């Protein structure tokens, strides 16, 4: 995470705050990922779903990322924990990479901590963004 202002839709913010609240009664209650998500939400620029730029990673967006060390491209869909399935490229918002990519735009670079150190990833393109497709309540 960095100090860059990120964009989050008001609808996503509402659902993410509920997720954080609900997590207080689960095994996630002491999770560092919940704390990181809270920090991300606190620094976000909140926009109406109809006003979010189509270049921004929102919930349920499918995006192509490029690893800046290996130049390999990876495709993920950012989802809520109950929809996560790594075998299908669906990454939970509570996974470190999920929290890290939320709200970033095409061309932005972010870091992701992994056991071997840090990975630097660039948002290469948005393959699908619900809001850009007219789906404001996904």
Image (cartoon, rainbow, N blue to C red):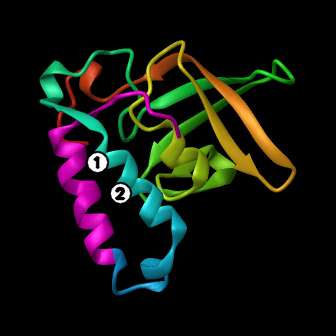
Whole-angstrom CA distance, mark 1 to mark 2, is 6 Å
Compared to residue 82, the image places residue 96 above or below, namely above
Where disc 1 sits, the SS reads helix
Compared to residue 93, the image places residue 129 above or below, namely above
Whole-percent x and y of residue 58?
Answer: 36, 34
Whole-percent x and y of residue 111?
Answer: 65, 36
Residue holding disc 2: 38
Q: Using a 10 Å C-alpha cutoff, classify the residue at mark 1 as few (fewer than 14 neighbours), some (14 to 19) or many (20 or more).
A: few
Q: Residue furthest front?
A: 3
Identify the residue at image location x=49%, y=84%. Answer: 27
Mark 1 vs 2: CB contact within 8 A: yes
Is 13 in front, or is 91?
13
Q: Using a 10 Å C-alpha cutoff, classify the residue at mark 2 as few (fewer than 14 neighbours), some (14 to 19) or many (20 or more).
A: some
Whole-percent x and y of residue 56?
Answer: 38, 22
Residue holding disc 1: 42
Q: Residue 15 vs residue 72: left or right? A: left
Q: Residue 44 vs residue 123: left or right? A: left
Identify the residue at image location x=28%, y=16%. Answer: 53
Identify the residue at image location x=35%, y=28%. Answer: 5
Q: Is residue 94 magenta?
A: no
Q: Is residue 7 magenta?
A: yes
Is 124 in front, or is 37?
37
Residue 128 sits in which quadrant? top left
Is 22 in front, or is 80?
22
Where disc 2 sits, the SS reads helix
Look at the image and give the residue range highlighted in magenta.
1-22
Whole-percent x and y of residue 108?
Answer: 53, 19
Rendered-image quadrant of the C terminus: top left
């Amino acid at each position: 995470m960095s100090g860059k202002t990120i964009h989050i839709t008001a609808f996503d913010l509402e659902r993410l705050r509920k997720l954080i609240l609900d997590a207080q009664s689960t095994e996630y209650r002491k999770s560092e990922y919940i704390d990181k998500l809270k920090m991300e939400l606190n620094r976000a620029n909140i926009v109406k779903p109809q006003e979010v730029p189509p270049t921004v990673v929102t919930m349920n967006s499918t995006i192509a990322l490029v690893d800046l060390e290996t130049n390999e491209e990876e495709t993920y869909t950012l989802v809520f924990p109950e929809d996560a399935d790594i075998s299908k490229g669906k990454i939970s918002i509570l996974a470190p990479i999920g929290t890290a990519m939320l709200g970033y735009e095409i061309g932005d670079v972010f870091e992701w901590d992994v056991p071997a150190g840090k990975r630097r990833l660039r948002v290469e393109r948005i393959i699908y963004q619900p809001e850009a497709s007219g789906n404001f309540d996904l």
